[in-house]
């Protein structure tokens, strides 16, 4: 077994240069995935910084989470001199990623057609609200596509559409962008040519609800919102238990139902032939569930956790996000890592962040570079492009770079 205390996690994309013109969540997620796998990712920011550096509330974690392992370079694209610096930077890139409105990058000569004319090996990842079509002019947000794409309908109670509790389309849209980049890299290794790929919020959302669309196509029955759905399983629910606690318990096969009854001492239910098969239990949920709720209300959550873990049955305590900082599995398996916060009242202080949820050679992909301060690497990167110290000073004086 590999010694995790001394070995370095694999960096399969080491040597790859990615230049990203991104903001918010979707584009930065794509860059984070590539950076975590070892790519040199250069985040090009406006000279006053990415807006997510200073968001409040639900947005306060955006920048430090999605911009680790990156370098920061501030460039004023509105300044022709700054735009020329950006084009020169892109000429050195293997991958360019962006998530601005259609037509924005072309204004600065930073679109795929312009850049690929001089860099035919370039892979260009565009992250949009919609793939090309009647909607592609619209401004999209995660919540917008959740509402129009059926996800909010499925998440909320009937008549009360509700967005999912995290930025699922933004994050997955960025991940699909990264998957596209990886596929294009393999193709480039064969053909020697790059390509443009696109990922979009709306199409990502539709992919997520595809199972419900097919349910309708196959059965002729519209999918009901999750709180009102007809479950595929007889026991698959949150139960209120002793001292006001809650726990999710499940038994999704006939063998699990037998184990469930044995573990809880429900011999009478196990022997009742009305509940012998899963489909019978689904049909009888209106009577079975109240009976189970009544019995389980007398049990403590920790008692049920112990019983279900010993029996190998599915269970889950109901936790809040902040409680995960104390999760024994995450702590033991290295699922959290320290980062230094770059902005705000806590700038310079450390906090724990979640890592990309894969291992390579048994290792989690960790934090090589802290989330950067604005323009932290501008001078280093300009020097690498051939600018002299005097040239760089001039660019700073002109406010073409930060």
Image (spheres, grey):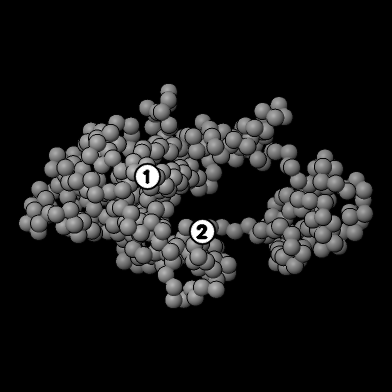
Name the residue located 55 percent from the left edge and 73 percent from the top edge: 1
253 displayed left or right of 162: right
Vertical side of 42 occupied by 370: above or below: below
> Which circle marks residue 188 in the picture?
1
- Tell me the tag on residue 258: none
Which circle's residue, 1 or 2, is located before the other in the chain? 1
Q: Is residue 345 visible?
A: no
Query: Where residue 358 is drawn, which disc sits there?
Result: 2
**Residue drawn at x 72%, y 50% as measured from the top left:** 237
Residue 372 percent coordinates (x, y): 30, 59
Residue 387 is situated, as x and y percent measured from the top left of the image, at: 12, 54
**Is label 1 in a helix, a strand or a loop?**
helix
Q: Quadrant of residue 133?
A: top left
Q: Residue furthest top?
A: 134
Q: Secondary structure at mark 2?
A: loop
Q: At 39% across and 38% down in the image, what residue appears? A: 197
Q: Is residue 378 left or right of residue 281?
A: left
């Amino acid at each position: 077994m590999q010694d995790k205390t001394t070995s370095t996690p694999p960096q399969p994309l080491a040597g790859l240069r990615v230049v990203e013109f991104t903001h918010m969540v979707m584009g930065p997620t794509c860059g984070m995935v590539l950076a975590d796998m070892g790519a040199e990712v250069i985040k090009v920011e406006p000279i006053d910084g990415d807006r997510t550096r200073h968001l409040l509330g639900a947005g306060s974690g955006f920048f430090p989470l999605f911009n680790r392992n990156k370098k920061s370079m501030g460039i004023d694209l509105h300044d022709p001199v700054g735009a020329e610096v950006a084009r020169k930077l892109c000429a050195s890139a293997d991958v360019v990623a962006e998530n601005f409105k259609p037509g924005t990058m072309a204004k600065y000569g930073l679109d795929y057609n312009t850049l690929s004319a001089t860099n035919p090996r370039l892979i260009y990842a565009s992250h949009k609200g919609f793939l090309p079509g009647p909607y592609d002019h619209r401004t999209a947000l995660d919540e917008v596509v959740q509402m129009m794409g059926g996800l909010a309908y499925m998440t909320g109670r009937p008549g009360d559409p509700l967005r999912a509790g995290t930025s699922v389309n933004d994050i997955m849209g960025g991940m699909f962008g990264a998957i596209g980049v990886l596929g294009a890299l393999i193709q480039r290794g064969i053909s020697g040519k790059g390509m443009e790929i696109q990922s979009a919020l709306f199409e990502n959302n539709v992919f997520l609800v595809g199972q419900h669309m097919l349910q309708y196509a196959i059965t002729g029955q519209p999918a009901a919102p999750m709180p009102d759905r007809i479950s595929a399983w007889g026991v698959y629910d949150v139960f209120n238990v002793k001292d006001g606690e809650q726990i999710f318990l499940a038994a999704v096969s006939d063998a699990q139902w037998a184990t469930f009854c044995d573990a809880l001492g429900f011999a009478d239910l196990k022997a009742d032939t009305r509940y012998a098969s899963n489909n019978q239990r689904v049909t009888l949920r209106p009577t079975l569930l109240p009976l189970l709720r009544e019995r389980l209300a007398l049990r403590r959550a920790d008692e049920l956790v112990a019983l279900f873990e010993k029996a190998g049955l599915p269970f889950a305590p109901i936790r809040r996000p902040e409680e995960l900082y104390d999760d024994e599995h995450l702590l033991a398996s290295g699922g959290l890592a320290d980062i230094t916060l770059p902005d705000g009242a806590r700038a310079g202080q450390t906090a724990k962040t979640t890592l990309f949820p894969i291992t390579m050679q048994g290792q989690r992909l960790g934090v090589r570079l802290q989330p950067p301060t604005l323009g932290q690497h501008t001078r280093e990167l300009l020097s690498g492009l051939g600018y002299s110290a005097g040239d760089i000073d001039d660019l700073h004086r002109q406010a073409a770079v930060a």
